[in-house]
Amino acid sequence: MHWINWAIVVAYLVFVVTDGIRKSKDTDTMAGYFAANKSLPWWVVGLSVMATQLSAVTMIGTTGQGATDGLRFVQLYFGLPIAMVILGVTLVPMLHGSGVFTAYEFLERRFDAKTRSLTAFLFLLSRGMSCGAIIAAPGVVFSAVFGIPLAWSVALIGIPTVIYTMIGGVQAVAWADVKQMFLIVIALLAIVAVLIFQMPIAPDDALRIAGATGRLKTFDFSFDLSETYTFWSGVLGGTFLMLSYFGTDQSQVQRYLTARSVDEAKSSLLMSAYWKIPLQALVLLVGVGVFVYSQFVRPPLLFNPAHEAAVSAERGAAYDDLQAQYANAFTLRETAALSVADAADDATAATAMGVFLAREADIQVIRGEALGLAAEVTGESVTDVNYIIPRFVLSELPLGLAGLFIAGVIAAAMSSVAAELNSLATTSVIDFYRRWVKPEAPDAHYLRISRGATAFWGLFACIVATYAATLGSLIEVVNRFGSFFYGSILGVFLLAMIPRARGTGAFVGLIAGMATVAAVTFGAPSVSFLWHNVIGAIVVLAVGVAMGDRSGA
Amino acid sequence: MNLPEQAPGPETDFRRTLIRVLVTQVVALALLGLLQLRYHV
């Protein structure tokens, strides 16, 4: 990458760390460090909520998914506005008004210590690992694309994040999120502008090509439990997923606990309700645009440069042969795509489209063979979706904009990691250290421990990220384990709103919910994970209510 | 005598916001639907 692009990345890193620390006030008290003294305006909290959810995976993985699979992924978010509305009248007033630092602390006040400790422990386990995975995803891509050791790219994201999170607490995280969110949106719009100005065909023709390859199909109304992305799984399963994430996950709850009032906390969530679906559609449309653009400007056969080098070194002759076939097939497809754009009437357009789709299928066969070669050589299962956008950015974006986009990817990773480190440290200290180890101590003592906990979780996440390739299956196990209890924890919080529910019922319900989801996962593996949250929450509610106090007192 | 109009309470205000959210989301989905109807083959 050109030094000017690197300079932009470095300038961003220096700015975000210094500004995050500068914006932090009263971080010498627990209320200041963990909850910003409930002083932040709704728009800061709202942007922080959005930045926390939007990770580097969105910037490089979801855009890549748009390029290969189109818009249908956006259906996952159809339940989000509904969830935000429900949270605005249920959990947000309850949590914000109770004066707690963590969502799990509230559960002890409502139920008992064992329910609090179990939910907090499950959060630490899953978020600790997922934090590593969030750093690993861009880290692995940067390592391959820039040819730097993985440890360096992990450090590039991890070290600055730990510094400002450790020093400035939740305020530094929130104010940094505001700038990071702006940078992310500008980076995405920069790609959109480049696509519009450099696309060799008219926008209407570009959309026709995208539509012909199925990439503009957003809605799938089939009711199929094994399909993750359908309208119904998005509306029903997505609502439960978003209720769990925004309502019970400390990495999000801690964001809106910093709002000045309950109303401002509600408004901060409504910002996501307004903007998440349009933003996600924009992210996917960027990928769709890159796909259409790649009909006219030949992209590499293998997007991962590390795989490209490995295959060239070990199976050079076979790869050269595939490259020659690819060059030829690309020219034929480009001609077919131009014929689609130039067609004068509907009949000619239909014929041209048929030829284009046949040529596109040829390219997919050749690409599949190249991926097969890469899998043989590396001994890994190979997908290169995450490399499509970075390769496009580095080869097609003008000087400066490429650096801006890379800074945007780092910003997306940092904003998610900072919120997770912040919430992991808060839960470690509030729900375990202060609860079980040292209940009475001055604020200064807890703050020292909190900064140490942030550093510990940062180091833990960086180690997980550095060994992500070898820990791959372990991370998958933890993620799967996470899906066992996400809906069940939501069930416990919903139960908290039912007067007759009691602590033992909540605890037994939580275990029953997780066990049921585990049974469904292994007994009916075809059922999509989105439905697991629905099942878990309903089982907890049923068990909790059945075991509740029949007097209703 | 002209009395100043009473400001809406937080409940009313929030309900209005919710309606606005739902309306904007339906519009966003309708745009995506139109894109699909127009171009998806």
Image: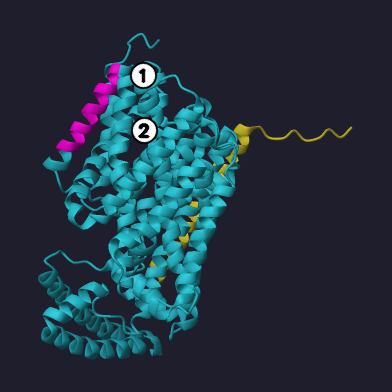
Chain colours: A cyan, B yellow
Is A511 included in the stretch rendered in magenta? yes
Please name whichever residue, A343 or A498, is drawn nearer the observer in this view of the structure: A498
Between the residue at mark 1 and the residue at mark 2, the CA separation in whole angstroms equals: 20 Å
Quickly name the residue at label 2: A428
Which of the chains bears the disc numbered 2?
A
Name the element at disc 2: helix
Is A54 included in the stretch rendered in magenta? no
Crowd rating for badge 2 (residues with CA inside 10 Å; few <14, some 14–19, many 20+): many
Q: Is residue A434 left or right of residue A355?
A: right
Q: Position of residue A154 (x, y in %)?
A: 33, 58
**Marks 1, 2 in one chain:** yes
**Which span of residues is magenta-colored?**
A504-519
Q: Is residue A174 above or below residue A259?
A: below
How many marks the image carries: the answer is: 2
Q: Is residue A273 visible?
A: no
Quickly name the residue at label 1: A111
Give the amino acid type for the residue marked by disc 1 in the picture. Phe
Q: What is the quadrant of residue A344 in the picture?
A: bottom left
Give the amino acid type for the residue marked by disc 2 in the picture. Ser
* Residue at 42% in and 46% down: A80
Q: Main secondary structure of the magenta part?
A: helix
